[in-house]
Image (cartoon, helix red, strand yellow):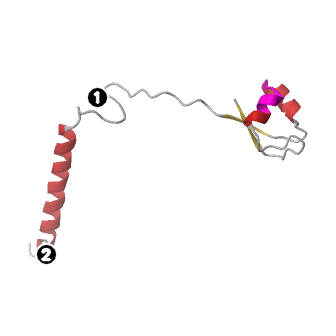
Amino acid sequence: MVAARPFLRPAAFLLAVSLALIGWRWATRGAAHPSGPRRGAGAPAVAPAPAPRRFYRVRPGDTLASIAARTGVSVARLRRLNPHANPTALFLGERLRLP
């Protein structure tokens, strides 16, 4: 028992803080939260799905025109979505953003 004595106060403090935190969370579980209203325990949270981002990886022989034909996106739209891409010098493996 003498060996455990130095650990009694820190253990009691941690227990008290844990119980206080559990009590606080229980008491505020129905309060307004910045993320929106609370749902029931069994209801899944429904968040709007982010728009999927699609990319095209440049292959040997690709040009903006061939990529546009392959993906169904106009060359003008590809240039607007990828201002960093040089249309006369595409690099192998370069990722181009698609809508």
Q: How many callouts does the rendering have?
A: 2
User: Residue 93 bears which disc, if any?
Assistant: none
**Distance between the Cα atoms at labels 2 and 1?**
44 Å
What type is the residue that disc 1 sits on? Ala
Q: Position of residue 30 (x, y in %)?
A: 23, 31
Q: Position of residue 68 (x, y in %)?
A: 82, 28
Q: Quadrant of residue 71?
A: top right
Above or below, comparing residue 75 to residue 9 in the picture: above
Of 29 and 14, nearer the camera is 29
Looking at the rendered structure, the secondary structure element under dot 1 is loop
Which is nearer the N-term, disc 2 or disc 1? 2
Q: Quadrant of residue 50?
A: top right
Above or below, comparing residue 19 to residue 5 in the picture: above
User: Residue 41 bears which disc, if any?
Assistant: 1
Q: Residues within 10 Å of mark 2 (few under 14, many from 20)?
A: few
The residue that mark 2 highlights is 3
Rendered residue at 88%/31% (across/down): 65
Above or below, comparing residue 6 to residue 20 in the picture: below
What type is the residue that disc 2 sits on? Ala
Q: Position of residue 38 (x, y in %)?
A: 30, 29
Residue 43 is covered by the magenta coloring: no
| Magenta-drawn segment | 72-78
Q: Is residue 23 left or right of residue 52?
A: left
Rendered residue at 27%/33% (across/down): 32
Rendered residue at 14%/73% (across/down): 6
Of 84 and 91, nearer the camera is 84
Q: Is residue 23 left or right of residue 87?
A: left
Of 9 and 73, nearer the camera is 73
Residue farthest toward the bottom in the current orientation of the protein: 2
